[in-house]
């Protein structure tokens, strides 16, 4: 069996797939994976080896689960098992193992492991006041991280700060979890937007070289009986509660590399308003066959999914002016028709505020969009489905440039509304979907199916045969 050993002094065997995860010094290392992938066992063993290393004197580890009591039978037990695997018969000489309170201390280095929960404000406050007799808190492990709120992560993240006396040490937060929901904040924060401080890792039970054959058979059975569960707990893929709304989405055909849009193509702009929630603007080009290409996007999010920038309509309009190159000919522009509603004040509406800025910059003004969630969804579906050409090629009616990262990130992950499956669940991040829907309704789509081959005229063929016979 091919494994790697962290240090020759200890009996520490690791699955090779986790080598990059264990070696990274990024501030955040985020390990998602299937059940049985070995990620938690690996992380526990990795921490034990590092905390025993005398080069890491002054390092302390905080282990967190949402419910403090669940640490005893999970993370504490896992780390204790890792001590016995790594140290063997010398475990008692190397570590002090305390059960009340839960605590592990390496006798060689003085490095400690402590355990906490984050279920309420009282426990969150206690985390803020953690200190150690020797060294600092440098590492945090969040097991079953999907149980935690984003606010919990921010509180813990603030604990990793200050100058470290030992130059070998570095601050790091480790998250391990099964990817139960594609709409979870962890995906938006750590996976969707590239960040040099984030190292993400994926593993499945198929990567675990220490797993038994019976578990493999169990997973194969689950694959047959519970395909959705197998996607999450067998393949470590993001789960979709309620089912993907646009199940025809295929990045291979609906996303393309940016290209220079021909000047002859019609261009238009579409917008969904938001302040507390994100605003979304998209620019589209229409080719000679009526296909839409979304070639530019502007997304007003606060760095977190479904969180807006709280900018005014005028401020947003200025961003639109800046994003649209001078001289670009925009034939028309559509905006959520609710933006023309009066808000109870005597001042201008949101649409008027935006258009006042656009007119001064000599930009195309917005007009009210056609609206209807079911109709929008149907038009997007029709365009994504497109048609099959004579040669069997799938020809979509809607394509996104690769630089439209938020449209590509959010639209495929939308799910069905629980009460009306014909509509998108608006609790999801649906702002890009809305602007695309407004744009599609502005140009209703009917697939241009290839003309069928004309049937052969059997009578003419028979007539020709008779003539030939008569001529003989």
Image (tube, grey):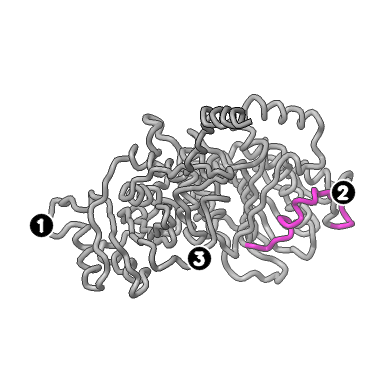
Name the one closer to the observer, 261 or 299: 261
As drawn, the label of residue 1 is none
Give me the residue at 79% from left, 63% from top: 54
Local packing at callout 2 (Cα closer than 10 Å; few below 14, some 14-19, many 20+) is few
Instruction: Kindly report the distance in space between the C-alpha atoms of the residues bearing marks 1 and 2.
Output: 74 Å
Asked if residue 92 is positioned above or below residue 189 in the image, the reply reads: above
Asked if residue 436 is positioned above or below residue 357 in the image, the reply reads: above
Residue at disc 2, secondary structure: loop
Tell which tag, 1 or 3, sits nearer the viewer. 3
Specify start and end residues of the magenta stretch as a single range.
7-26
Residue 328, can we see it? yes
Task: Name the residue beneath numbered marker 2.
Answer: 2
Mark with earlier residue (1, 3): 3
Task: Name the residue beneath numbered marker 1.
Answer: 346
Task: List x then y, in percent, for residue 220.
Answer: 72, 29
- Hey, which quadrant is residue 225 in on the image? top right
Callout 1–callout 2 Cβ contact below 8 Å: no
**Residue furthest out toward the left:** 346
As drawn, the label of residue 259 is 3
Give me the residue at 40% from left, 31% from top: 421
Give me the residue at 59% from left, 28% from top: 470
Callout 3–callout 2 Cβ contact below 8 Å: no
Name the one closer to the observer, 294 or 413: 294
Does residue 22 show up magenta in the picture?
yes
Residue at disc 3, secondary structure: loop
Task: List x then y, in percent, for residue 423.
Answer: 37, 36
Task: List x then y, in percent, for residue 147.
Answer: 54, 41
Is 264 left, or right, of 357 in this rendering?
right
């Amino acid at each position: 069996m091919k494994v790697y050993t962290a240090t020759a002094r200890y009996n520490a065997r690791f699955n090779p797939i986790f080598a990059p995860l264990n070696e990274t010094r990024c501030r955040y290392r985020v390990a998602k994976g299937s059940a049985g992938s070995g990620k938690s066992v690996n992380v526990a063993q990795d921490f034990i080896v590092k905390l025993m290393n005398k080069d890491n004197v002054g390092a302390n580890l905080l282990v967190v689960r949402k419910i403090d009591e669940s640490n005893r039978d999970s993370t504490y037990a896992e780390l204790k098992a890792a001590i016995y695997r790594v140290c063997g018969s010398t475990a008692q000489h190397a570590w002090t193992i305390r059960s009340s309170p839960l605590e592990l201390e390496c006798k060689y280095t003085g490095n400690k492991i402590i355990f906490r929960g984050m279920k309420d404000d009282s426990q969150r406050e206690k985390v803020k006041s953690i200190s150690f007799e020797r060294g600092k808190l440098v590492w945090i492990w969040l097991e079953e991280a999907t149980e935690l709120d984003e606010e919990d992560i921010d509180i813990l993240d603030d604990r990793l700060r200050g100058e470290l006396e030992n130059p070998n040490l570095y601050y790091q937060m480790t998250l391990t979890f099964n990817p139960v929901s594609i709409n979870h904040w962890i995906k938006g924060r750590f996976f969707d937007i590239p960040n040099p401080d984030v190292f993400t890792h994926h593993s499945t039970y198929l990567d675990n070289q220490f797993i038994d054959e019976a578990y493999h058979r169990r997973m194969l059975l689950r694959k047959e009986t519970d395909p959705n569960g197998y996607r999450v707990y067998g393949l470590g893929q993001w789960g979709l509660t309620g089912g993907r709304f646009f199940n025809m989405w295929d990045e291979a055909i609906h996303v393309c590399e940016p290209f220079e849009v021909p000047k002859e193509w019609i261009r238009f702009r579409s917008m969904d308003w938001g302040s507390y929630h994100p605003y979304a603007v998209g620019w589209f080009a229409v080719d000679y066959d009526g296909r839409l290409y979304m070639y530019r996007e502007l997304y007003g999010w606060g760095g977190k999914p479904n969180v807006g920038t709280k900018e005014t309509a005028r401020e947003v309009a200025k961003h639109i002016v800046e994003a649209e190159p001078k001289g670009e000919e925009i034939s028309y522009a559509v905006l959520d028709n609710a933006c023309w509603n009066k808000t109870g004040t005597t001042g201008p509406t949101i649409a008027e505020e935006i258009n006042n800025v656009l007119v001064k910059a000599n930009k195309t003004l917005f007009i009210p969009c056609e609206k209807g969630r079911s109709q929008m969804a149907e038009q997007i579906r029709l365009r994504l489905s497109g048609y099959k050409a004579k040669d069997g090629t799938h020809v979509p009616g809607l394509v996104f440039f690769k630089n439209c990262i938020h449209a590509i990130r959010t639209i495929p992950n939308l799910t069905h509304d629980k009460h009306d499956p014909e509509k998108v669940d608006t609790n999801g991040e649906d702002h890009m979907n809305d602007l695309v829907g407004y744009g599609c309704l502005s140009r209703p789509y009917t697939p241009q199916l290839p003309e069928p081959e004309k049937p052969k005229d059997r009578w003419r063929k028979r007539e020709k045969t008779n003539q030939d016979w008569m001529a003989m």
